[in-house]
Structure formats: structure tokens, C-alpha cells
Amino acid sequence: MSKSPEDEHPRKAFGWAARDPSGVLSPFRFSRRATGDDDVTFKVLYCGICHSDLHFIKNEWGFSTYPMVPGHEIVGIATEVGSKVKRFKVGDKVGVGCNIGACHSCDNCTKDLESYCPKVILTYSSTYYDGTTNYGGYSDIMVVNERYAVLFPDNLPLDAGAPLLCAGITVYSPLKYYGLSEPGMHLGVVGLGGLGHMAVKFAKAFGLKVTVISTSPSKEKEAIERLGADSFLVSRDQVQMQEAMGTLDGIIDTVSAHHPLLPLISLLKSHGKLVMVGAPEKPLEVPVFPLLVGRKLIAGSATGGMKETQEMVDFAGKHNITADIEVIPMDYVNTAFERLLKADVKYRFVIDIANTLNAA
Amino acid sequence: MAKSAEEEHPQKAVGWAARDPSGVLSPFKFSRRDNGDNDVTIKILYCGIGHTDLHNLKNEWGTSLYPMVPGYEIAGVVTEVGRNVTKFRVGDKVGVGCMIGSCRSCDNCAQDLENYCHKGILTYNSAYYDGSITFGGFSDKVVVDHNYVLRFPDNLPLDAAAPLLCAGITVYSPMKYFGFNEPGKHLGVVGLGGLGHMAVKFGKAFGLKVTVISTSASKEKDALERLGADSFLISHDPDQMQAAMGTLDGIIDTVSAVHPLQPLINLLKTNGKLIMVGAPDKPLELPIFPLLMGRKLVAGSGIGGLKETQEMVDFAGKQNITADIEVIPMDYVNTAMERLAKGDVKYRFVIDVANTLTC
């Protein structure tokens, strides 16, 4: 007989959950495990809203489990640490991202690439080692294995720092892995949303020249004046796209809607790299000839390992990089999802959990 | 007034050419330029036949110019050198591959990557610096700028070495660039034809574990026993493909027919690389999710620069690597093209030009 979410664990918890693929969220009582020897427990202060949360609550990828408490850009203050915990103490600023467990013995895990472990455990809509359901960060407390917690530098505001934990690492990791982090290189960023705006910020911090490629001419002023992009291409403007052919060393493509790849491949120099970090549901068409003729490549990347996530947060601390956010109360969350669907946010919603998540 | 092919240049030449997209070849009189200060004149002994010749003959890419003399796996001996040429002497065993010119000033040329120069000049079906159309190796002689000539080591038989100049470099280059030249890695090779069998040979010479992936069960024996592959997967056998999921560090995909990529992507380990060296003429479907989940990539590669081609030929000399060939007389070429279209050759046709080209 499986226990109810409230009885599953010893410690009371409260959050907002979706009950079904309508994706509508509402108050939800559940429970968290006691702090294990390797665990860090923290009071959640803020949680970012990621487009993946939207995909999950509506079961768009087909493997959602309900009731689902989403949220994987979670920040707060440590309230308890287990006896074997080395990196954290009570009062530390802590963050948790997309993953909370893995096998720790495969090739990927031994290379600090837990996110690519075939047995990786997602922060929510998954089961833990003990078979219990995982609930994410739209909730009042989190208990996490130390390995999956990140220490936030003191100088980073927690609300604007929360999106680093998914959006940040999702673009930082491939910029480094694919060698698109050398000063002087020219990077394209497709899509100016949560991921895209973080890519612009990190790329500028790496010393790259950055061109934003977008369907919305209205984003140009912001991209250049506020985010610091060097130029802006409207992807539907054939003349602009033609002129920019063969100018980019790499492109970070954040768009998860179906879109043509050939115009992007054409923007690349020889040996250029198109890195997909958005996940279109259906396959895209890839013309092979241009890849051969220019020795170009199309690659994918998803979040990053924990060591690299900590490195990214530390880098963000040194360079004062945080997300541009709209802070919302918990009960605005369903409206926020409707707006997110229309990309009506500059550029990430962050839920003010501590002040607005009220247990009924 | 354009000159005829025979009168365009001062040196008489003979070859076989296609006149139209039927691709049917027949004897053709034309001419070659005089040997300039930087040139090498080569008496052609052998010329390999590549699938690209077939694509070009039938104008499958829409860029063909007729009359067309194909052939870019040329092996022969030097008969004349220009006064600025120091690397070659009369009598040397030399070869010419897919390229005979480039701009020599762009970033790519400066890095010995002439094959990625936007102004690359192909050995045939291309406009040379002087505007004349280039004619390839299905002919008795060729005059080439010394920068585009390769030297063959003495120990390599010229007929079996000719295919190194296109098939060889086309697989060698990406194997090096993408890191599949280190012992212990596991490489898949899709398609066991001219390119595929060379990839198996180079792969084994690099110390890799090699798995051939093919639609033809009949090729398994040869792949394992003669070419030295470690294992063989039938691509339409779902059980075999399933069992091999996540086992390959990389794949060299030589197939130019349209084919599904997802099963190949699934064979790759995390961080695995699928390298396309065949050129399907229609776009392929690329599922993005698996690339993200495994941090995998799909890349293209086309031949190689001249420096690397020479390095590859020298490596082949040391390792005694040549192609498995079927030598044919010139007048068999149309039949050979028909057989090539059906993949009916183990694994490269080579024309015995010197002994059988008559006009």
C-alpha cells in the first residue's frame, strides 16, 4: 500500500502541484525525508520558472507523473546539514538545479557529468533511490544530497541568481565544452528568452562578439543596449541573414519550436558549430551537403554536471552575472505559465516562495 | 568565340567524357595547357572511380558542365616539371586528388585546409584560374600546379594506392580531426564501399575497435575476415542495433542515400560523434532530443587539405594500406558505373588508363 504524499516522509512540506496534464497548479500538502547524513535541508526562498516546467506539467514529453510539484531553479538558506556534509553549513546560501541523484559509478558520473548518467534522477517528476516521488522547488523546504547542492557566492542576489541553476548552466556548459568561450570569437544566440539572455551575458563575460538572432525585431533595442549584444539579426529578413553568412564561429540555439536549420548553418564559418539547447519535439531537417562543404557540426547539450554548475555559479559571482527576472507571488503561477507560453516575460519568472507561499 | 576542347590548350590530350546527364562516357579529344613554371605534367597510369563521379556524370547535384572528363584519384609518373618546382622530378610516382587550385590567401588556405576554401578548384567540372573548364583523370595526362600533387611512397602499388587520394583522405581527415585515431576507441563505419572499407583499414591501423554497420549481411564475412573489422551490425536488425546502443565513440557514415539517423545516434555513447562523409541530396531528419540527452553531435567532413593528404599517403605507405580494387579497362567504364550505382564492387574500380585508353 503506497503512502499518501503527506505520510510518505516524516517532515511536513507544502507546495503547489499540478494534478493532471491540464497543468493547472494549486496548493498541495506533502512531506520531505529527514536530513540524512549526506543531506542538506534548506528553506526555499525563491524558485525560477523554466520552460521545461511547462513541458512537464502538460506532459508534453510523455513521462510526467502526478501530482507534480515543479521547480528546478531553487535557492534558499541551509537550515540543517547531515553529519557527513563537508561543503555546507547552516545559514549558507544554497541552490539546487535539475538533478538530485545519479548512479555515481558510470563513465559519465566519474567524469563529473552526472547530467548524462543513464540513471540520472531529476529534481521532480521522478523517483528517488528509495522509490519515493520527488517534488521540486515550488515548495517551502528541500532536502538534497550534498553533491547536488551548489553554494551561492554572497554577492549574488538569490532571486536573480536562481535561474543560473538551469538556464545558466544549460548555456554555460556547451559554451565551454564546444570551445565557444575564447575572446574574439563570434557567437550567435538564437532566441532571446530565459536561456538566450543568459547566453548573451556569459558570452560577453567570456569576451566574445555576440549576435542575437530572433524573430522579434522588438527585442533589438534591449538586446543591444541592455544585454550588451553586438548585433541583432531578424531571422526572417533574408537580406540581413544573407549578409551575415559565414560570420559566426558558433551558435547557441535556444529555440524549442520547430524551425529551419539551414539558414543557421549558413551563418556559420567553416568548422562552425550549431549547438542546440532547446528541444523541439519533432525531428528537424538537416541538409547534409553544407555540413560537408564547411566541416560544420550540429550538437546538443543539456544542463551540466555538478562540478561545472558550481564553477558556473562562481564565475557568475565574479562577473556579477544574474538573470533578468520578474518576481511573482505563488498564486500568480498559473498566469505566469500562460504568459511564458507566449514568451511574454523579460526574461525569467521567479517565484517569491518565502513571502508568498502560504500553507493554508 | 570559345575554342573547342581540342584547341583550347597547346598539348593534345585524350580521354573519355560524358556529353550529357545520361552520364554515358565515350572517347574524347581535348587538350592540356603547357607545363608552366609551377606545374608538373603527369602521364596517367591509373584512375580510381568514385561515387561522386557518378553523381557528377548524371548532374545529380545540378552543377555539371559537359563535356565532362571525370576522375580525381589519379596516379602516374612525372614527365615534366616547371622551373620553380623543387619537390618533384621526372620519373617520380605521383598522384592528384579532388583539388587542383584554391585562393591560397584565405584563413582556410593559410591553415592548409584548401579543401574548405570558398574558391577551391576541383580537378574536373570546375573553372580554372584562366577560366577554362578542368578535365579529370579518365585521360592520358594532366598538368597540375605542384602544390596539388602528392608523392607516392615507393612501396605502394599505384593502382591500389590511387583511391587513397579521395576515398582515403575523405575518411582519414575526419578520423583525425574528431579524435578517432587513438587506440582503444570504438568506431562504427556505416556502409562498406570505397570509403567504408578504407575507414575500416585506417581504423584498425590507428588501433581502434571497429564495427561495420551495413544493410548487406553478405558483407559480414569479408568485413571481419579480410578487412579486420571487430564486429558487424545489420542496420535493419532491431535486436542487433538495440544490443549495440551506447557502445560507439564515433561513427563514420559513408552512405549517400537518404537514410534514418536516429538508429545511428542511438549507437553512440555520451559525447559521441556521427560524422557524415556521404552527401545525401535531400535533407535528413534529425531528432534533437537524443543529441541533447547524450551531448552528441552530427558533423560533416569533405576530403582534406593537401598537407594532410600527403601525411595520409605517407602513413598508408608505412602501414601498407591500399584500397581493395577491381582493375578495369577504359572501355568497361560505363558498365562499371552501372555496377557502382548498385554497390556491386569490392570496393573500388580503378581504370588501367595507360594500358587501355585508346582514342
Image: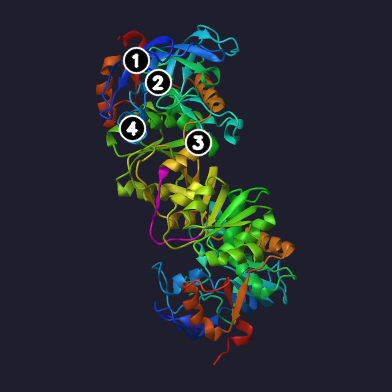
Q: Name the spot of residue B325 as percent of width and height, x first.
A: 35, 21
Q: Name the spot of residue B177 as percent of width and height, x first.
A: 54, 37
Q: Nearer the viewer, residue A266 or A27?
A: A266
| Residue A298 seen anywhere in this rendered image of the structure | no
The numbered dot on residue B135 is 2
Callout 2 secondary element: loop
Q: Which residue is mark 4?
A: B55
Q: Nearer the viewer, residue A33 or A181?
A: A181
Asked if disc 1 and disc 3 are in contact, CB closer than 8 Å, the reply is no
Q: Nearer the viewer, residue A325 or B159?
A: A325
Residue numbers of the magenta segment: A278-288
Camera-near label (3 vs 2) is 2
A335 falls in the magenta region: no
Q: Nearer the viewer, residue B349 or A101?
A: B349
Q: Which residue is mark 3?
A: B174
Residue A6 lies, with reference to residue A320, above or below; the image says below
Q: Quadrant of the N terminus of chain B?
A: top left
